[in-house]
């Protein structure tokens, strides 16, 4: 009988340190039970994650978590370098908690941390909350002494804006659940010119953000998620920006060098008619016509048919290769879908993330009926005008498919008109018996329908 050898234990400690640093911190700690040799190896990991959620439950378990942090710091190998330290602790305001947090941050700085992640936000806060909670912690002064810090993520953690000038090596910054005071973003980008990624989530400010004329700005990725700017919007001059994501209520923004962008993700949560918003959406779509990957929401789809007529956008040609639509495919969004299919003449991949649009109750009679000619005309009219359907569109994805009438009509429209389609993937992702039964009937129906492409493969996933 062949013997089983523990080959990994034959490796030298230096290699085991690398392996341990590549696995999650929680799993690295668990390796201490493997054998006597492994008992202290985890203390050499370069990736430390203190997450309160690993100790969820009673107040006693919170104290266990704080005690665990203390033990780890006290027993960590002195000569080891901490590349990344992450601390997640809701409401650290208690005296003991605050002291341990300060000690943890000081420890990270002493060990030459490169990636520092501090999250003190409450798990009970939601993005829909109207109130703007005060930050629960103040960033330690010693942090600004670290000249090698490359990544800084602060959630519900205040900082003095002027001190940001010292972070000349920063490449990635994430800020969340805090007020941005005294032109903090402008100060950050103007002085930390190495920054390539900026992520702002659930932040608010009384000022408009204007960051123009910054020499050698390297910003490549900008994410603004669920933020509120009292003075309205922001202007950023970023010649190297390739990715832009904006999720939240409509906020006016202007990005110079928008023709350099490769991917844009737009989701406007607040939906109401306003002539000024028509102009904003019109200019936004025009400015982003060069992007290769474009994600849009149901609000934009609903407005586009009217806006395209108002501003003569019907003949707009877009460079988009992958179009993602977050929508419920309501009737007032359907014409917007067709507008983008007409405009994206080089489209190769079309994705529908269904159920991501406005939540509207759908009665049972709205589900598909084969003899529903009025609905069919909505999709099939001018179907041949979509150039991408006959030249470039190869793949269609429909996620969270439920069998709603407009989902089926869209699917039928694409199958009947996509002459170069190779694959259509329909992901049901719903375990409700009624939905699954309806989708199986749709699957049977679609398998019998004529297809414009002889190479088309239709796949339903349950």
Image (cartoon, rainbow, N blue to C red):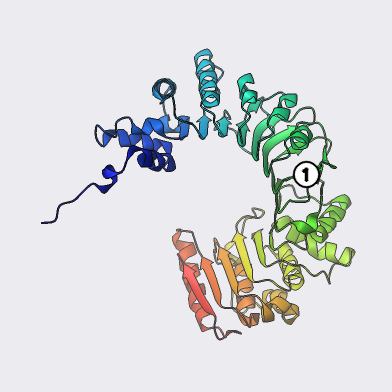
Tell me, yes or no, if residue 441 can be seen here: yes
Where does the C terminus fall, quadrant-wise?
bottom left
Can you tell which quarter of the image residue 420 is in?
A: bottom right
Can you say whether 34 is above or below 359 in the image? above
Q: Residues within 10 Å of mark 1 (few under 14, many from 20)?
A: few
- Count of numbered circles in the view: 1
Q: Residue at horizontal 29%, vertical 46%? A: 8
Where residue 32 appears, as percent x and y from the top left, is 30, 33
Q: Nearer the viewer, residue 88 or 3?
A: 3
Can you say whether 347 is above or below 171 in the image? below
Is residue 351 toward the left or the right of residue 73 in the image?
Answer: right
Can you say whether 254 is above or below 447 in the image? above
Name the residue that disc number 1 marks: 216
Where residue 310 appears, as percent x and y from the top left, is 89, 64
Where residue 323 appears, as percent x and y from the top left, is 67, 64
Where residue 83 appears, as percent x and y from the top left, is 51, 35
Tell me, yes or no, if residue 128 can be seen here: no
Q: Nearer the viewer, residue 355 or 399?
A: 399
Disc 1 element: loop
Q: Residue at horizontal 70%, vertical 59%? A: 262
Can you tell which quarter of the image residue 372 is in?
A: bottom right
């Amino acid at each position: 009988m062949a013997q089983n050898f523990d080959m990994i234990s034959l490796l030298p400690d230096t290699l085991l340190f690398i392996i341990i640093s590549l696995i999650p911190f929680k799993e690295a700690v668990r390796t201490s039970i493997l054998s006597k040799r492994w008992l202290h190896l985890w203390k050499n990991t370069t990736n430390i994650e203190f997450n309160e959620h690993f100790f969820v439950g009673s107040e006693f378990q919170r104290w266990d978590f704080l005690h665990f942090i203390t033990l780890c710091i006290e027993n960590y190998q002195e000569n080891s370098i901490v590349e990344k330290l992450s601390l997640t602790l809701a409401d650290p305001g208690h005296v003991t908690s605050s002291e341990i947090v300060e000690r943890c941050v000081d420890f990270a700085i002493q060990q030459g941390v490169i990636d520092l992640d501090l999250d003190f936000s409450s798990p009970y806060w939601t993005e829909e909350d109207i109130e703007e909670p005060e930050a629960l912690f103040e960033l330690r002064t010693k942090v600004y002494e670290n000249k090698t810090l490359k990544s800084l993520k602060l959630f519900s953690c205040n900082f003095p804006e002027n001190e940001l000038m010292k972070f000349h090596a920063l490449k990635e910054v994430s800020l969340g659940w805090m007020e941005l005071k005294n032109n903090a973003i402008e100060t950050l980008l103007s002085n930390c010119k190495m920054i390539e990624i900026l992520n702002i989530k659930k932040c608010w400010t009384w000022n408009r953000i204007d960051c123009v004329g910054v020499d050698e700005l390297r910003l490549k990725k900008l994410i603004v998620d669920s933020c509120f700017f009292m003075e309205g919007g922001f202007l950023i001059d970023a010649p190297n920006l390739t990715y832009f994501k904006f999720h939240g209520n409509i906020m006016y923004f202007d990005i110079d060098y928008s023709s350099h962008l490769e991917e844009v993700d737009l989701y406007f949560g607040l939906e109401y008619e306003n002539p000024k918003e028509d102009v904003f959406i019109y200019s936004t779509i025009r400015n982003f016509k060069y992007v290769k990957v474009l994600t849009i929401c149901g609000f934009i789809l609903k407005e586009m048919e009217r806006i395209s007529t108002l501003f003569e956008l019907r003949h707009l040609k877009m460079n988009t290769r992958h179009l993602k639509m977050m929508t419920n495919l309501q009737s007032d969004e359907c014409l917007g879908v067709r507008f983008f299919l007409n405009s994206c003449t080089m489209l190769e991949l079309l994705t529908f993330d269904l159920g991501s649009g406005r939540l509207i109750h759908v009665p049972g009679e709205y589900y598909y009926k084969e003899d529903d000619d009025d609905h069919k005309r909505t999709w099939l009219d001018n179907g041949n005008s979509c150039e991408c359907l006959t030249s470039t569109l190869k793949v269609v994805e429909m996620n969270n498919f439920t069998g709603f009438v407009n989902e089926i009509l869209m699917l039928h429209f694409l199958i009947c008109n996509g002459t170069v389609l190779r694959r259509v993937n329909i992901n049901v992702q719903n375990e409700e018996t009624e939905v699954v039964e309806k989708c199986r009937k749709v699957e049977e129906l679609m398998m019998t329908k004529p297809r414009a492409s002889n190479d088309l493969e239709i796949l339903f996933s349950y």
